[in-house]
Image: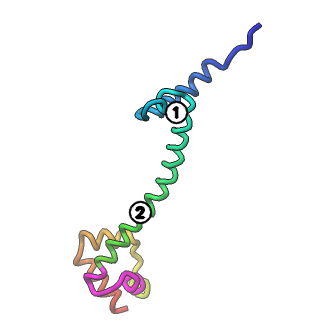
Amino acid sequence: MPKAGTVPAGRRRRRKFLKRAKGFVGGRRKLYRTARETVQRALMFATRDRRDSKAVIRKLWITRISAGAVENGLTYSRLIGGLKKAKIEVDRKILADLAHSEKKVFSELAAIAKAA
């Protein structure tokens, strides 16, 4: 009696990878083995870049805060240090938003930091 293959399960498994490979060029889309390798590589990069994007966003916040601090006659580190001494707990996301859109409020915070 011939051995039964894993036809339904195997086909499902292969189809899953080929579905994810949509938009790839040439054999990377059509051939199972190359599609699987490319999809796994793409997933690896996606995981890495999700982490990296958080660092990029934090750098943007720090750049915006630094630019706002220079406008008010401070450096970034003096501004952050002054806010800590004055016991004002504002995270970098909020500070960056204030420096970007609410310049008056940010300049008041900078004055408090300068005094501390």
- The residue lying at 39 percent from left, 86 percent from top is 78
CA distance separating discs 2 and 1: 30 Å
Please state which of residues 74 and 109 is positioned toward the viewer in this rendering.
74
Helix, strand or loop: magenta stretch? helix
Q: In which quadrant will I find the C terminus?
A: bottom left
29 displayed left or right of 67: right
Please give the range of residues in magenta: 69-82
Please state which of residues 99 and 112 is positioned toward the viewer in this rendering.
99
Q: Which residue is mark 2?
A: 56
What amino acid is at disc 1? Ala
- The residue lying at 55 percent from left, 41 percent from top is 40
Element under label 1? helix
31 displayed left or right of 4: left
Residue lying at the far bottom in this picture: please name it. Answer: 115
Identify the disc placed on residue 35: 1
Sequence-wise first label, 2 or 1? 1
**Viewer-nearest of discs 2 and 1:** 1
111 displayed left or right of 8: left
Q: Is residue 76 magenta?
A: yes
